[in-house]
Amino acid sequence: LRHGLVFAGQRSFLGRQAGRHAFFADTEHTCVRCGKRFIITTEHRYAVQEDCNYHEGRLWTKRDGSSTAKVYSCCQSPPGSSGCQVGKYHVTAGTR
């Protein structure tokens, strides 16, 4: 693997690089909803199909009298809690 490319005998052919055949490798992404890492194959499919468990709301500071606590706006759960929404797929903002 060099510069995001795999050489000699792997996956689908895409062109030549320095006189050798170049092939794109599977790409790892981070889900923008749950933060979990996942892989998209060269065939543009998920390497492993799994649900995305996430909070659709934002983390904010809740004030209750003199005390404060960070909670998600969607379900009032604290940071680190399991997501309150389940998506069929992970979502990426592109290759990073």
Image (cartoon, grey):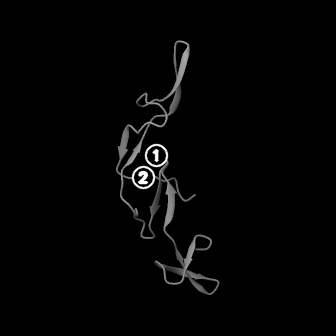
* Residue type of the residue flagged with mark 2: His
* Residue type of the residue flagged with mark 1: Cys
Residue 72 — which label?
none
Q: In the image, residue 14 lies at what x, y percent?
A: 52, 79
Task: State the residue in front, 68 or 20.
Answer: 68
Q: With respect to residue 72, does 89 lie above or below?
A: below
Q: In the image, residue 91 lies at what x, y percent?
A: 45, 52
Q: Which residue position holds label 1?
A: 34
In the rendered view of the protein, which quadrant contains the C terminus?
bottom right
Identity of the residue drawn at 36% across and 50% down: 51
Q: Could you tell me which secondary element the residue under label 2 belongs to?
A: loop
- Within-10-Å neighbours for mark 1: few <14, some 14–19, many 20+: some
Task: State the residue in front, 78 or 84.
Answer: 78
Q: Relative to 12, is 68 on the left or the right?
A: right
Q: Which residue position holds label 2?
A: 90
Q: Could you tell me which secondary element the residue under label 1 belongs to?
A: loop
